[in-house]
């Protein structure tokens, strides 16, 4: 449902379920909820996409892409698990990854290479099953897993309730004096199922 007409229908249904979204839709239009500013680098590879999401943790997308491009150059193209393992931890660090991130990308590569994580099969798994599989990787928390589900797998019903931006936007949407907790945000979002990814896109955009 990522074509413009499909998005319009999804947002119309979301506005019917949550009238407060109507003004946001009028203001911002049918925001593409799956947009990911990686220039198409990882669209064809779940492993490369998850690697980039790990690299992107707590740094800007611009910086993350510089680091990823160094990795891709050294790997001879789109990174594969075998190529990452062959490069080794110290080389990954030399691309600009922290010690922790180099370990996390290495763990991802090892798990995929061994078959412990069937990352290409995630396309066909349910949201919770796919998220649980990703959480088995060192350094992959709920936020990284949920971003992967949104940006790579294009799942329409994901609400990253732990994201501070989402929680701030919910506070503004509801006129709250305090930022809601993760559990409160998750409960609030139940009314937006099965279009919580679309709701998330609007909430993020509302932050300006």
Image: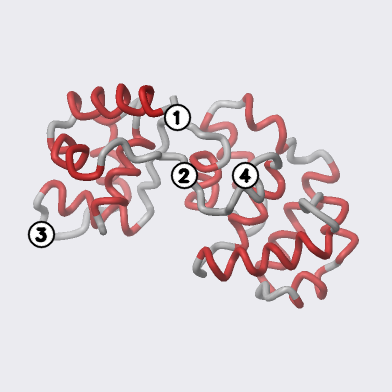
Query: Disc 2 versus disc 3: distance between alpha carbons?
Result: 31 Å
Q: Earlier in the sequence, mark 1 or mark 3?
A: 1
> Residue drawn at (51%, 34%), measured in percent from left and top?
154
The quadrant holding residue 87 is bottom right
Image location (x, y in percent) of residue 56? 56, 62
Quarter of the image with the N terminus is: top left
The quadrant holding residue 188 is top left
Binning the other alpha carbons within 10 Å of mark 1 as few (below 14), some (14 to 19) or many (20 upward) gives some
Query: Disc 2 versus disc 4: distance between alpha carbons?
Result: 21 Å
> Residue drawn at (74%, 35%), measured in percent from left and top?
118
> Residue drawn at (30%, 22%), measured in percent from left and top?
9
Binning the other alpha carbons within 10 Å of mark 3 as few (below 14), some (14 to 19) or many (20 upward) gives few
| Residue located beneath label 1 in the image | 2
Left/right of residue 124 with respect to residue 166 in the rendered view: right
Do residues under tags 2 and 3 come within 8 Å of each other at their CB atoms?
A: no
Q: Nearer the observer, disc 1 or disc 4?
A: 1
Callout 4: helix, strand or loop?
helix
Binning the other alpha carbons within 10 Å of mark 2 as few (below 14), some (14 to 19) or many (20 upward) gives few
- Marking on residue 42: none
Image location (x, y in percent) of residue 34? 46, 40
Vertical position of residue 49 compared to residue 25: above or below: below
């Amino acid at each position: 449902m990522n074509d413009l007409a499909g998005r319009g229908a999804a947002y119309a249904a979301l506005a019917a379920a949550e009238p407060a979204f109507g003004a946001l839709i009028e203001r911002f239009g049918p925001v593409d909820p799956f947009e990911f500013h990686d220039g198409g680098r990882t669209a064809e590879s779940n492993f490369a996409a998850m690697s980039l999401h790990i690299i992107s943790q707590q740094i800007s997308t611009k910086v993350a892409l510089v680091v990823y491009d160094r990795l891709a150059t050294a790997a001879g193209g789109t990174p594969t698990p075998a190529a990452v393992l062959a490069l080794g931890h110290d080389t990954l660090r030399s691309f600009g990854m922290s010690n922790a991130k180099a370990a996390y990308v290495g763990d991802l590569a090892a798990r995929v290479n061994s078959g412990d994580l069937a990352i290409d099969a995630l396309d066909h798994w349910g949201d919770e099953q796919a998220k649980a599989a990703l959480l088995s990787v060192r350094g992959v928390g709920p936020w990284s897993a949920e971003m992967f589900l949104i940006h790579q797998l294009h799942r329409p019903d994901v609400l990253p309730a732990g994201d501070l931006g989402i929680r701030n936007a919910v506070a503004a949407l509801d006129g709250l004096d305090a930022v809601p907790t993760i559990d409160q945000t998750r409960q609030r979002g139940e009314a937006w199922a099965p279009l919580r990814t679309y709701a998330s896109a609007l909430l993020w955009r509302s932050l300006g």
